[in-house]
Amino acid sequence: MTNSWAVVIGINYYQRHPERQLKYAVQDAQLMNEFLCNYAQFPKDHVILCLGDKAHRDTSNYPLCSNLLGLLTQDLHPDRIGKVDRFWFFFAGHGISRNGRDYLITSDSLIGDIDLRIVLPLDEIIACLRQHQDAEIVLILDSCRQIVGSRDIGDVVGEKTIQLAQSSGITTIFSCDYGQFSHELDSKKHGAFTYAFIEGLKQYTLPRQLEIYLQKRVPELNSQDGKSSRQIPRIRVDSVSRACQFLLPECATKLDIDEIIRIATRAELEDDFEEAKRLWWRVVEVSRSITQVNEARKVIERIAGKSSKAQAGLPIPSREDGDDKKNPLKPLNISISTIDLNPDDWSQKPRNVSQSFWNKISNFIRSLFEEKD
């Protein structure tokens, strides 16, 4: 059983900055909490939900700076919770960058404080998360928002955080690119990014495919809500190999597995046998189809044989040297006058293919069996 933990923070209410109130950061945190517990199989008592609005001011996890630091440095320390396999940190709210350092703004922060003493430094967050040395860590920041009704104050958060996160082996997901706004949607009662992020995770858990989905879906949602569509989410990983790792293996979809198989096939064609085997083992680990798992194991065995021959300096047989050469298929030399590519139109369009076409198909198939005999 995977030991998964998460801290999920959403802040609408900033007690010292009424001009900076947000509408849907709390709702975004609640949506993320629901997804992690009900869909991604995180134990409910392992997801620490910190909601920053007036309704939750008396709760123990209210996102004051001291409360959040206590969670990260004490309550969720490895000495308390043991070995962690996966740790997600989600934040929806305001962020700020000052003097080359990135910060998250807590409910009690005072932005006018030139020393920023009541804020949550992102480098400290990363250091706390990285104490879980063997964990797959994902840092999700829906905070690059630069106007009222958006989630950023001052300079853009992100550049320093990306560098530090990558050097720490942490996958970082930003709601938008440098200098862009990250919008809230009145039509959805959520931020555009978080709404699309949860949608996307139910279809893709590979970082690259998820990023492609978000970069299409978020501008689409913003446009539908009358907001600027110039909001491009970014996902950053620390290595090329991590881009082929599932963010949530338990939630891997058919689209994910198909993509891994495509990449594995390409690796084999390029004679990168170790990479191909590694990718096929990922199919074995996440696939829920016994047939697909068995087929994947056969492929791994075949690739291992090719790898052994390559290491021994022996020639590696190509497909042309196999059974296909012994029983080559003859080309089907038949002209077809019309092919309908749109299946919705098939019932309305006349068929221009004569009966002789089907006779030639039958004769061709019959000839194959006759050759075998």
Image (cartoon, rainbow, N blue to C red):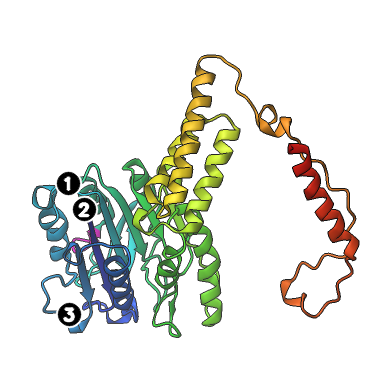
Expressed as whole percent of the image width and height from the top left, the position of residue 215 reads 53, 63
Q: Which residues are magenta?
A: 114-120
Q: Considering the numbered disc 1 on the image, is that residue within a helix, a strand or a loop?
A: loop
The tag on residue 56 is 3
Q: Secondary structure at mark 3?
A: helix
Q: CA distance from mark 3 to mark 2?
A: 28 Å
Q: Of residues 267 and 91, which is closer to you in this image? A: 267
Dot 2 falls on a residue whose secondary structure is loop
Of all residues shown, which one is farthest toward the top?
Answer: 313
- The residue beneath circle 1 is 83
- The kind of residue on which mark 3 rests is His
Q: Are marks 3 and 1 in contact (CB under 8 Å)?
A: no
* Residues marked 1 and 2 touching at CB (< 8 Å): yes
On whether residue 117 falls in the magenta region, the answer is: yes
Up-down: is 194 above or below 263? below
What residue would you read off at disc 2?
A: 3
Give the mark nearer the N terminus: 1 vs 2.
2
Return the disc, 3 or 1, that comes first in the chain's sequence.
3
Front tag of 3 and 1: 1
Q: Amino acid at mark 1?
A: Lys
Above or below residue 171? Residue 350 is below
Residue 311 in the image: x percent, y percent?
50, 18
Relative horizontal placement of residue 125, taking residue 294 as reference (left or right): left
